[in-house]
Amino acid sequence: MEWIILVAMVLLLLMGFPMMIPLISGAMILVFFFLDNIDPYILIQQMRTGIVPYSLLAVPLFIFAADIMSTGKTSNRLVDFVGSFVGHMRGGYAITTAAACTLFGSISGSTQATVVAVGTPMRQRLLKMGYKDSSAIALIINASDIALLIPPSIGMIIYALVADASVGDLFIAGIGPGLLIFLFFAVYAVIHAKVHNIPRVEKASWSERFTFTRKALLPLGFPVIIVGGIYMGYFTPTEAAGVSVLYALILEVLVFRSIKIFHLPKIALSTGLVTSAVFILVAAGQAFSVAINRARIPHTLTDAVLGPDPSALTILFIVALFFFIGCMFVDPIVVILILTPIFAPVATAAGVDPVHLGVVIVFQAALGSATPPFGVDIFTASAVFNKSYLDVIRGTPPYIVMLVIVAILVILFEDISLFLIR
C-alpha cells in the first residue's frame, strides 16, 4: 500500500503537477482503494479543518509585513547600519551580509524574502570587494536560512499547528540556533577573507555610525515588538503579526515615505498569491495526514525505521535525516506537514521536548532550503540574480558543512534551543 501511494505521488511530481495534487491524490487513493469504511467526504472536511486554526492568520500577516518591508528601504537601512560597525573588519562585508540576513529574518520570517531583500544590495557590494560571484551568492542563500529560525518564522507556525505546540515558545527557542549559525558564518568570513586576501574598507566614523544607527532604529524595533511583546505576554503571535503589519505600514508609508498608498494593492496581491499557495498546501497536507493516520502508515514506518524502543537521541537524528533529505527535494512546508505527524508522537513518547523537536525540524527545513538538488532558495537566487543553477550551488559546500555541524550541536545540546525559555 505504501509503495503504491509513493509511486503515484512521485509520478505526478515528475509530470509537473504542483505539490498539492500529489498530496490530495495520495489521500484519495488511500480512501477509495484501501479504506472502504471511510466516507470520501472526510477529505474535503479535513482540508477545511486544516486552514481553520486561528494561529494560521499570522502567516498572511507576517508575509504582508515582509512584502511591505522588502518593497521599502528597510533592508538597505539594516545593511548600512551593520556595515558601519563591522564593514572595516577582515571579511566585514560578508559578516555584514550574514548579520543583515539575521536582522531581516527577524522581520520577514521567510528565507526567500531575505534572499531578495538583502541579497540584491549585498551581492553587488561583495563583488566590488573582490568576492567571487559563487561565494557571494552561496553566502546570501545560506545566511537567509537563519530567517526560518529567528522569529517570526513561518516554518515554526506550521510546525506548531501540526504538533499542537506553543508558537511563542518556538519563536523564542529559534533565537539560540539562529545566532549560532551567524557566529559560524562570521568566523568563516574572517578566515575566507584572509585566505583570499579580500581587502578591507575604510572604517566608518562615529558620526556616520550615529547616522546609520538613527536610520535603522525604527526597523530594529520589529524584533523587539514581536519577541518582546510575545515574551512579556502583551499579545499572542497572531496579534504580533497584526502589529507588525501596522508597524511596517507606518514606517514605509508615513515615516520613510518609500511606499505610496497606491502601491499597497499590488503588494497585497503578491501577499495573497503566496498565502494562497501556503494555505492550499496546508489544506492538502491535513487531508493527507488524516488519511495516512487512518491507514496506520506512520506506525508502520516508525516501527520499521526506529525499532521497538528507540532512545530520544536516536529519534532526533532519524528525524533530522528524514527532514533534511525531504527538504532537499520538496518545499519545507510540505515536508513539515507530512512528516511531523509521523515522528512527533514517537518523539514525545520518548521524552523529547516538543519545542526542541520543532527547532530540530525547522532547522533541517532551513538547511534543506539551500541544499541541492531542489532547495527552494537556490531557484529563488537563480531567478533574482539571473544566474545558472550550477553557478548558484558552486560555493555552497562550506556553508552546508557548517550548517550540518550546528544541526548536530542543536540535537546534542537542547539548551541551545531551550535556554531562553528556561
Image: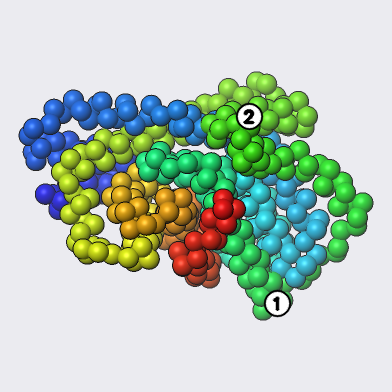
Q: Left or right: where does residue 325 sit relative to residue 76?
A: left
Q: Nearer the viewer, residue 12 or 233?
A: 233
Mark 2 lies on a secondary structure that is helix
Residue sitting at x 73%, y 47%? 78
Q: Residues within 10 Å of mark 1 (few under 14, many from 20)?
A: few
Q: Is residue 76 visible?
A: no
> Which residue corresponds to mark 2?
243
Q: Position of residue 275 (x, y in %)?
A: 46, 32
Q: Left or right: where does residue 210 sit relative to residue 245?
A: right
Q: Left or right: where does residue 209 sit relative to residue 189?
A: right
Label 2 sits on what residue type? Val
The colour scheme of the drawn protein is: rainbow
Q: Quadrant of residue 206?
A: bottom right
Q: Nearer the viewer, residue 68 or 389?
A: 68
Mark closest to the chain's N terminus, 1 or 2: 1
Q: Nearer the viewer, residue 193 or 78?
A: 78
Q: Quadrant of residue 107?
A: top right
Residue sitting at x 14%, y 40%? 30
**Which of the two discs, 1 and 2, sits closer to the camera?**
2
Residue sitting at x 87%, y 58%? 204
How many numbered badges does the structure rendering display? 2
Q: Which mark is residue 194?
A: 1
Q: Is residue 414 above or below residue 35?
A: below
Q: Position of residue 314 (x, y in %)?
A: 34, 66
Mark 1 lies on a secondary structure that is helix
- Distance from disc 1 to disc 2, alpha carbons, whole Å, reads 43 Å
